[in-house]
Image (cartoon, helix red, strand yellow):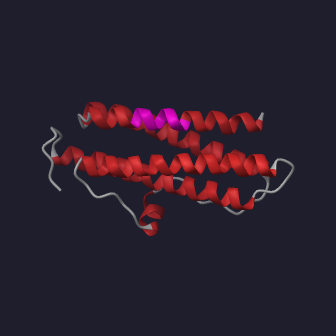
Amino acid sequence: MKTGIGISDKNSQAVALILNKLLADEHILYVKTRNYHWNIEGRNFIELHKFYETLYTEMAETIDEVAERIRKIGHFAEGRLKDFIKLASLEEGEYTTKQEEQLQNLLDDHEAICRSIREHLPEVEDKYKDAGTTDFLTGVLKQHEKWAWMVRAYLH
């Protein structure tokens, strides 16, 4: 789908790949959070069960926004699980019911997404000349910083 929004085809294609990789990581983290929601055990079961539900509900909105951003710049958003697995830098991980392990895994993943977004911001802004996606990614970064902070609070 060709656009006339002021980004060259070559640049929008490169940005779409960055966004599709983010979309894949968002899905891996979303599924991991749902898995933990279903399989949490321990003293704080109800509290963490609800906390995980809040996280994955908010992440679902972010996933939709990332996919829509890809469409706005003229490309298809990946939507198959096998493509997410190929594109993602995050890993699904093993099953665990241990609260501390679940929380640490979620924290590590939120922080990894923060680092990845930070690495791509200058490239998207300066190399690919896409101020709209730079602004969008900054918002996603802020959301993951918030989620990381909330998860980190349970670990200390």
- Residue 144 location, quadrant: top right
Picture coordinates of residue 21 (x, y %)? 41, 52
> Which residue is at the front of the view, 151 or 12?
151
Question: Which residue is found at the position 28% from the left and 52% from the top?
Answer: 71
Question: Which corner quadrant holds the N terminus?
Answer: bottom left
Q: Residue at x 45, y 51 (%)?
A: 63
Q: Bounds of the magenta span?
A: 137-144
Q: Is residue 101 visible?
A: yes
73 vs 104, left or right, is left
User: Which residue is at 50% across, 32% downward?
Assistant: 142
Q: Is residue 3 left or right of residue 107?
A: left
* Tally of numbered tags: 0
Q: Position of residue 100 (x, y in %)?
A: 78, 47
Q: Position of residue 121 (x, y in %)?
A: 37, 34
Of helix, strand and loop, which mostly describes the magenta segment? helix
Position above or below: 129 against 90:
above
